[in-house]
């Protein structure tokens, strides 16, 4: 049995689709923060079969819930304070994502104007479809369950 100690203050991301923890680590820019991170891959899960878990010891303010909700809104976010689960945060699909995905349309203004923010708006919540704010190019997350 693998033993990874608890964290005093920070957050635990649970129920991550197996194999997705490293992408989430980079997308949340955890590599740029000066905090302790434990990545647990392929843990046994009665609900999912296998899952990944991220344990992060740093203030929860460092966590971008919009990016996380965009990646996978089924992830459980447990906020830890004084070695105990203080709060569970629910993730939702954000109405807008900024500079997370890039438009693939070569004629889009974002392809020409490099400094322009890449902004995608949620246009179909049921199918989890986002469209480029400028050219309406469709983006569907390939990592969805």
Image (cartoon, rainbow, N blue to C red):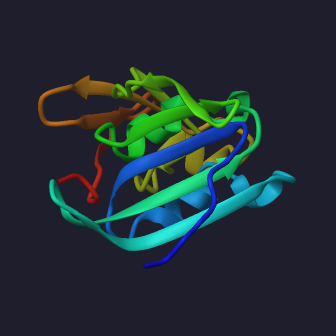
Residue 112 placed where, x, y %? 63, 49
Check the image and name the residue furthest to the right: 34
Residue 100 placed where, x, y %? 54, 45
Would you place residue 85 above or below residue 118 in this image?
A: above
Q: Quadrant of residue 92?
A: top left
- The N terminus sits in image quarter: bottom left
Write the residue at 53% across / 45% down.
12
**23 to the left or right of 63:** left
Q: Pick whichever, 52 or 97, lies toward us.
A: 52
Q: Quadrant of residue 94?
A: top left
**89 to the left or right of 74:** right
Write the residue at 69% across / 52% down.
29
**7 to the left or right of 130:** right
Write the residue at 43% across / 73% down.
41
Residue 16 placed where, x, y %? 36, 55
Write the residue at 58% across / 32% down.
84
């Amino acid at each position: 049995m693998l033993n990874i100690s608890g964290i005093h203050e920070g957050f635990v991301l649970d129920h991550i689709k197996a194999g997705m923890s490293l992408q989430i680590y980079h997308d949340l820019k955890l590599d740029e923060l000066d905090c302790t991170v434990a990545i647990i891959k392929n843990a046994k899960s009665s609900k999912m079969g296998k899952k990944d878990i991220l344990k992060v010891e740093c203030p929860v303010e460092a966590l971008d819930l919009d990016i996380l909700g965009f990646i996978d809104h089924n992830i459980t976010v447990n906020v830890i304070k004084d070695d105990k689960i203080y709060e569970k945060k629910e993730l939702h699909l954000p109405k807008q994502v900024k500079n997370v995905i890039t438009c693939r349309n070569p004629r889009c203004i974002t392809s020409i104007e490099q400094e322009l923010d890449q902004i995608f708006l949620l246009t179909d919540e049921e199918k989890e479809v986002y469209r480029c704010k400028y050219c309406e190019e469709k983006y569907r997350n390939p990592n969805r369950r």
